[in-house]
């Protein structure tokens, strides 16, 4: 699984690439973003060669720490749900 997070101003651009294993990876990402209390502006999901590519643009809450902190929380929530 690969997670990339870029914060630009008040928005985060999040990209997740993971195997399409039938355990609803797109739902797990949305749950992780919900736990972070992010407001989703745009989300897209693509399936390519047995991989799921997810791109999300979300509003970042005031005082959010960093791209790395967001990435870490997404990975933890994504892999434990």
Image: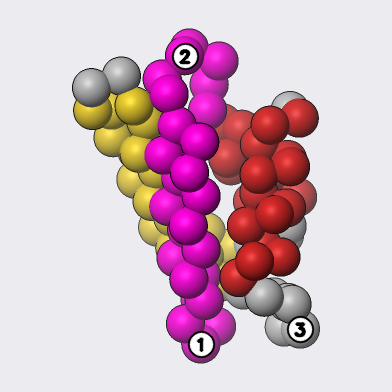
Q: Position of residue 8 (x, y in %)?
A: 47, 82
Residue 9's disc is 1
73 left or right, relative to 19: right
- Cα separation, mark 2 vs mark 3, equals 35 Å
Queried whether the magenta region covers residue 31, the answer comes back as: no
Q: Where is mark 2, residue-wise?
A: 21
Q: Where is mark 3, residue-wise?
A: 63
- Pointer 3 and pointer 1: residues touching (CB < 8 Å)? no
Q: What range is drawn magenta here?
A: 1-26
Q: Quadrant of residue 19?
A: top left
The residue lying at 34 percent from left, 27 percent from top is 51
- Cα separation, mark 1 vs mark 2, equals 34 Å
Which of the two discs, 2 and 3, sits closer to the camera? 2
In the image, residue 60 sits, relative to residue 54, either above or below, namely: below
The answer to which of marks 3 and 1 sits earlier in the sequence is: 1
The residue lying at 66 percent from left, 44 percent from top is 75
- Which quadrant: the C terminus? top right
49 left or right, relative to 51: left
Asked if one can make out residue 31 in the rendered structure from this viewpoint, the answer is no
- Pointer 1 and pointer 2: residues touching (CB < 8 Å)? no
Q: Closest to the observer: 1 or 32? A: 1
State how many labels appear.
3
The answer to which of marks 1 and 2 sits earlier in the sequence is: 1
Mark 2 Cα shell of 10 Å, populated few (<14), some (14-19), many (≥20): few
Q: Quadrant of residue 78?
A: top right
For label 3, the SS is loop
């Amino acid at each position: 699984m690969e997670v990339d997070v870029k914060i630009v101003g008040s928005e985060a651009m999040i990209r997740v690439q993971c195997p399409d294993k039938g355990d609803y990876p797109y739902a797990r990402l949305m749950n992780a973003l919900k736990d972070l209390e992010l407001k989703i502006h745009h989300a897209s999901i693509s399936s390519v060669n047995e991989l799921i590519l997810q791109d999300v643009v979300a509003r970042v809450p005031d005082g959010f720490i960093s791209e790395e902190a967001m990435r870490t929380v997404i990975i933890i929530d994504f892999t434990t749900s």
